[in-house]
Image: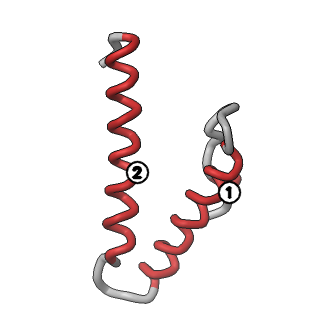
Amino acid sequence: MRTNDLPSPGSISNGLSLRTDVARAISFVESRSRKTSVVPDQLVTLRAFLDAASAKLTAIETEYFGVE
């Protein structure tokens, strides 16, 4: 995955680095996925990490802004 394929995380500290690191991690998983017929462990753990991050942001949004 190319960094430009992900949207910018906005003007947050280390935003560009975050975008680059996530794109790099996705590329790694994508590369592994091409070489196997089973779902790589890295895909499962990366998805769990990103899902947890998304859930935390949703919780913050709900707590502070009442958005659900």
Q: Residue at x 34, y 48 (%)?
A: 51
Q: Quadrant of residue 61?
A: top left
Crowding near the residue tagged with mark 1, few <14, some 14–19, many ≥20 C-alpha atoms within 10 Å:
some
Mark 1, secondary structure of its residue: helix
List x then y, in percent, for residue 29. Answer: 47, 73
**Mark 2 or mark 1, which is nearer the start of the sequence?**
1
Label drawn at residue 59: none
List x then y, in percent, for residue 55. Answer: 33, 37
Residue to which mark 1 is pinned: 3
Amino acid carrying label 1: it is Thr
Q: Quadrant of the C terminus?
A: top left
Amino acid carrying label 2: it is Leu
Q: Quadrant of the N terminus?
A: bottom right
Front of the two marks 1 and 2: 2
Crowding near the residue tagged with mark 2, few <14, some 14–19, many ≥20 C-alpha atoms within 10 Å:
few
List x then y, in percent, for residue 58. Answer: 36, 29
In this rendering, the answer to whether 18 lies above or below 1 is above
Residue to which mark 2 is pinned: 50
Residue 45 shown left or right of residue 25 in the figure: left
In this rendering, the answer to whether 38 lies above or below 66 is below
